[in-house]
Each structure stands twice: as C-alpha cells, then as structure tokens.
Image (spheres, helix red, strand yellow):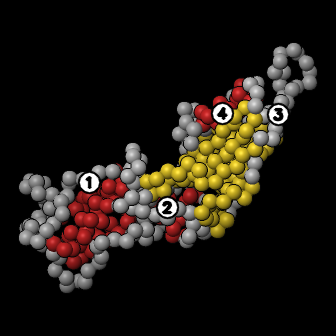
Amino acid sequence: MAIITAARYNSLQATVENVMGNGAGQFGYGQTLASSQVAADTTIDSGHMSTLYTDLINARVHQVGSVPNSVATVSAGDVIEEDATDTGTARGILQYEDLATLIETNKALIYTADTSQSTITANKTNSSSTTSWNGVRDHIVTVTFATADARRHFFNAGGEIRFTADLDPAASNGKNNDWNSLLANMGTVTFTSNNCPSLGSSPGTSFNIGNFDMTASDQLIFQKDGSGVYAENDYNIKAKELNSTTIQFTIQFRDDDIGDDTNNDGAINPIDESVTGTLQSVVGERLPTGSRVSLTSPTFNTTNTL
C-alpha cells in the first residue's frame, strides 16, 4: 500500500489542473476541475483519488477519444498501491503520475475521428461575388473571443479557424479552370495554435504561424499558387491580432497574371482574361465540445466583402 502525502497529491493535481484548468500561455483548456489542492496535513483518501481520476480521464478522452486502461478509479476500501504494474489493479499512484505526464506531453492533441470531442461548423461567416474580376479581391473577417483567456483555451484545446473557397466558373476557359482547380484542390485550411496547414489533395504552403505567433502587423500564414501560365495567381491568408481578444484574417484572391499568349497565335500583346463566375470565401471553426471539454464559440464577422 502506498502512503500518498499531501505534497505528492498536490504535485499530481497541479499537473492535471495546468492542462485542464485555466493554465497559462499554451497550457489550459479552461475547464472546471473535480479535484483541487489539499492542505498540508490532509490524509489522502478514496474521495481525493476519485476526483483526480475524473479529471485525468476527461483530459485523456478529449485527447485520444477513449478511456485509458492504465488507471482505475479508487473506491472506499480499495488499496492504493505504489506501482500496480504487477497486480494489474491499475490503482497505483505511479500509474496516475504517468498518465498525468502523458496528458501534459499531449496537451495539444484533440480527438477528431468522430464528433465526440469537437464540432465542425463549416460556415460561420462568408462572402461571395458574381462580378467578373482580375487584380485582388479581399474578404476580411474578424474572430472575437469573450476574453484573452477564452482565446487561449480555444486553441489550447484543439480549436481551429477553418477556411474554404471555391469558384463556380461562368465559362470554361484557362483562367477560370485554373482558379477552380486551385481552390478545390487546396481543401480546407486550418488555423491552429501554431500552424495553418491545408487538408486538400494539393495543399498550399503553411508558414508555421498560428494563434500564439500573432502580432499587431499582418503576417502571411498560408498561400496556394496557381499553375502553368497562371502560376502568378494565388490564394493567400494574412492574419494579425487587433487586441488580446480579436484576430483579423485577410483572405486574398490575387489574380496577378498579366496575360500570356494563351491562344498561341504569336501576338505580342498578351491576353489578360477576367475571372468570371461565382467566387465564394467561407470561414468556419472546429469547436471543442462534448462532456469532457466544452468551450464557447467566438464571434465571427465579415468586415469587408469580396
């Protein structure tokens, strides 16, 4: 039987609370814990271990989607061992400490194979245009959190700001078709705590910039280029923080191609076609939800339309 001191229990509980509770910086899911610190002269009993078990399991299920079998809850009358490896009871304090360390190491994980730990809302705000264009079209969006801590918690718990776009061409031609392919193959772009990758069959370039890298000036966080004679064209996203609670995203459709001999007639004057059809930019989110970790959605606003 293990003698668990208050100091040892508090150290273990503090590790879990740093991940599940308010935390600081890139720690903290913003949840209310079942366990808490105890006084120095407290005798640790099954009640303390049971609440700690609840917090450990909630964190780990949020991360991996299933209850680990390395630890078991402790009830009145159960023996808490130092190391339960040999007995197989999973009630060893060492196993609890190992799981707490694993949760801390994997703090940025969120289980995404189903909807048990998060909810994707594809369209929180959008803009579309049917006007023919070339040059640059901007869709500007602000995402505002209730507090600076709420913003941290959202990204720490695996929240994402998600971007998609498409062009439904009015006619089939080289430039329209290239824009259509560029946006379709790009897939969904996901702005996370420290990165902004895309999930498509032909992903663009992420510049490894996420929420915790924001400054007061725009930074290019993602770019997807056109192909062939339209390689100058690109879709890009820039981001900056307006204040501690608000991030501004500028989603740009840059038709920088100045024209080519697209009809191969050898003419010296290049043809700079306009893009025609319905252009759409959509911004959504992955929100941590469920019975283990649950957060409130930020507010999405379009401040400049296409």
How far separated are the C-alphas under marks 2 and 1? 23 Å
Mark 2 surroundings: few (<14), some (14-19) or many (≥20) residues within 10 A: many
First in sequence: mark 1 or mark 4?
A: 1
The residue that appears at 38% across and 52% down in the rendered structure is 116
First in sequence: mark 2 or mark 3?
A: 2
Q: Secondary structure at mark 4?
A: helix
**Residue at numbered disc 1:** 67
At which x and y percent is residue 96?
A: 22, 62
Q: Label 4 is placed on what type of residue?
A: Leu
**Residue at numbered disc 3:** 274
First in sequence: mark 1 or mark 3?
A: 1
Q: Secondary structure at mark 2?
A: helix
| Marks 4,3: beta carbons within 8 A | no
First in sequence: mark 2 or mark 1?
A: 1
**Residue at numbered disc 4:** 182
Asked whether residue 289 is in view, the answer is yes
Quadrant in which the N terminus is drawn = bottom left
User: In which quarter of the view is residue 136 placed?
Assistant: top right
How far separated are the C-alphas under marks 4 and 3? 16 Å
Q: Label 3 is placed on what type of residue?
A: Ser
> Which residue of the protein is positioned furthest toward the top in this rendering?
265
At which x and y percent is residue 212?
A: 55, 60
How far separated are the C-alphas under marks 1 and 3? 55 Å
